[in-house]
Amino acid sequence: MPDLPDKPAPPRRDRPQGRSAYERLLEELRQGRIGPGARLREAELAERFGLSRTPIREALRQLETDGLVVHLPRVGAAVRRLDYAEVMELYEMRAVLEGTAARLAGRAASDIEIAELDTLNTEMAAAEGDAGRVTRLNRQFHLTLLDAAKNRFLVKSMAAISRTLMILGPSTLTETARVGEAAAEHARLIAAIRARDGDAAEQVMRAHIERAHLFRLRQLRHTEPPGPGD
């Protein structure tokens, strides 16, 4: 008799559910409902999402592949914590990639894309006080900028950075003091892109990310330090 596989492949019907569970967990990370170090118990997640444990297991495996989840001794699956050096490196790469996107957008953005950036920024500034809406509009602004850069490899690279940023919790724009600043920085960026000045657009974007980095470090000072082995 031929040897049976140790773990049979999950039924096809579970695969879309696994994707759904993965996307729901990503959204909970993005919104800060699941934070760094949080335990991810299959049974609890399955009950909360109304799914079997198989798609939850698939989702956790994908999150582990993404570098967002780790398996800890005597704990099991948990959201990974980033140490100080990783946060510094993450924002350094974000400045490089989004700065490049801004420079490319200065050359390639259409008038319609520039107008959309302007609209999104205006709506974001007007939404001050509604942290959820501000965060969504800011995210759409940065995604629109990436689209305007018209470089698919840059988009893929930035997607990996964005996923890792989720570990840090909610956007720095949850701080009201940051919203007006960010909108003003966006406005300077749009002006540089409209003027087709790619170098200026890159400089503005790098300064924008550096300012966000500063606010992030301030946030992290008020969180628990990583536990041993995290």
Image (cartoon, rainbow, N blue to C red):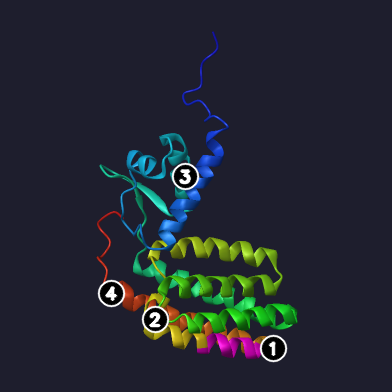
Q: Secondary structure at mark 4?
A: loop
Q: Which residues are magenta?
A: 184-192
Q: Residues within 10 Å of mark 1 (few under 14, many from 20)?
A: some
Q: Amino acid at mark 2?
A: Leu
The residue indicated by pointer 1 is 194
Q: Which label was assigned to residue 214?
A: 2
Q: Amino acid at mark 1?
A: Arg
Residues tagged 3 and 4 counted as in contact (Cβ below 8 A): no
Q: Residues within 10 Å of mark 2 (few under 14, many from 20)?
A: few
Picture layout, residue 158 above or below residue 12: below
Q: CA distance from mark 1 to mark 2?
A: 28 Å
Q: Look at discs 1 and 4 and give the one toward the viewer.
A: 1
Q: CA distance from mark 2 to mark 3?
A: 32 Å
The picture quadrant where one finds residue 178 is bottom left
Picture layout, residue 77 above or below residue 28: above
Q: CA distance from mark 1 to mark 3?
A: 42 Å
Q: Residues within 10 Å of mark 3 (few under 14, many from 20)?
A: many
Residue 160, image x, y percentages: 54, 61
Residue 45, image x, y percentages: 37, 44
The residue indicated by pointer 3 is 59
Q: Look at discs 2 and 3 and give the one toward the viewer.
A: 3
Residue 127, image x, y percentages: 47, 80
Could you say which is closer to the camera, residue 115 or residue 36? 115
Q: Secondary structure at mark 1?
A: helix
| For marks 1 and 2 on the same chain, the one whose residue lies earlier in the sequence | 1
Q: Amino acid at mark 4?
A: Arg
The residue indicated by pointer 4 is 221
Query: Does residue 19 appear anywhere in the picture?
Result: yes
Residue sitting at x 51%, y 46%: 20
Residue sitting at x 47%, y 75%: 134
